[in-house]
Image (cartoon, rainbow, N blue to C red):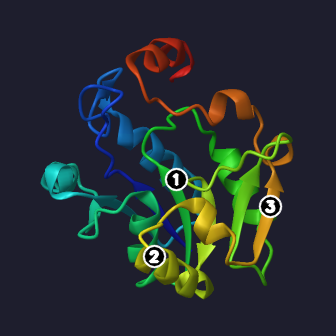
């Protein structure tokens, strides 16, 4: 399996490029990449990025796939699925995610599904922390062609296994916290090792 780290967002709410923002002296994206490396489950770890930060990520020693579609995170996932048969997708802004939870998610994902997406008990899904397979490509292409590259559009057209967040993640309320604002960062800093 290939691990894909999404790093192409505009960071509007954060105010500066959060992909490279230093947390305890290390760019945020490296927290996610290093946990993927420690899991030993992935043949490759690839960061999908825009022109804005691709060269800096490459200078950090990361393999970069350039997002030339620029239609959002599902477009970035689509680009990776055109190359790889099965991918685990994680955003660059979940530095509190645990290695054991990554491993649990991959292990829980059964064959026969186009995607395995964590779902909260209230029905909210985590489509950017998921496993996707190339069998979902047609749905991605349909939604992109309709100018609706949203997770809702894509999920409605594929065979999804929904994974119970509380069973897959050890501490889901903490681990699945996206660092979208400086306030999110202040709250999370105490938990970042």
- How far apart are the two marked residues, 1 and 3, measured between alpha carbons? 16 Å
Which residue carries the number 3 mark? 162
Q: Secondary structure at mark 3?
A: strand
Q: Residue at x 79, y 68 (%)?
A: 161
**Residue, disc 2:** 146
Residue at which label 1 appears: 90
Badge 1 vs badge 3, beta-carbon distance below 8 Å: no
The residue shown at (37%, 35%) is 28
Q: How many marks?
A: 3
Relative vertical location of residue 119 with respect to residue 189 in this rendering, above or below: below
Q: Is residue 85 left or right of residue 56?
A: right
Query: Of the residues under marks 3 and 2, which one precedes in the sequence?
Result: 2
Q: Position of residue 26 (x, y in %)?
A: 31, 30
Task: Quote the CA–CA distance across marks 2 and 1.
Answer: 25 Å
- Vertical side of 67 occupied by 91: above or below: above
Disc number lying in front (2 or 1): 2
Q: Residues within 10 Å of mark 2 (few under 14, many from 20)?
A: few
Q: Secondary structure at mark 1?
A: strand
Report the residue at 43% width, 49% height from top: 33
Q: Is residue 63 left or right of residue 117?
A: left
The numbered mark, 1 or 3, whose residue comes first in the sequence reads: 1
Residue at (66, 68) in percent of width and height: 155
Q: Position of residue 92 (x, y in %)?
A: 42, 45
Label 1 or label 3, whichever lies nearer to me, is 3
Marks 2 & 1, CB-CB < 8 Å contact? no
| Residue 110 place in picture, x, y as percent | 80, 74
Tell me which numbered mark, 2 or 1, is placed earlier along the sequence.
1
């Amino acid at each position: 399996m290939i691990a894909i780290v999404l790093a192409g967002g505009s960071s509007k709410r954060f105010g500066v490029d959060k992909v490279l923002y230093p947390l305890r002296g290390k760019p945020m994206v490296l927290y996610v990449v290093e946990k993927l490396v420690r899991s030993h489950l992935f043949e490759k770890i690839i960061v999908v990025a825009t022109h804005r930060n691709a060269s800096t990520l490459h200078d950090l020693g990361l393999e970069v796939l350039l997002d030339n579609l620029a239609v959002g995170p599902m477009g970035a996932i689509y680009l990776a699925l055109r190359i790889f048969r099965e991918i685990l997708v994680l955003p660059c802004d979940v530095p509190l995610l645990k290695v054991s939870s990554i491993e649990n998610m991959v292990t829980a994902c059964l064959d026969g599904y186009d995607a395995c997406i964590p779902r909260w008990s209230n029905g909210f899904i985590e489509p950017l922390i998921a496993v996707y397979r190339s069998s979902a490509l047609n749905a991605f292409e349909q939604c992109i062609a309709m100018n609706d590259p949203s997770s809702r559009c894509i999920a409605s057209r594929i065979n999804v296994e929904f994974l119970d967040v509380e069973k897959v993640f050890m501490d889901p309320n903490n681990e699945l916290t996206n660092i979208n604002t400086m306030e999110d960062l202040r709250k999370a800093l105490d938990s970042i090792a």
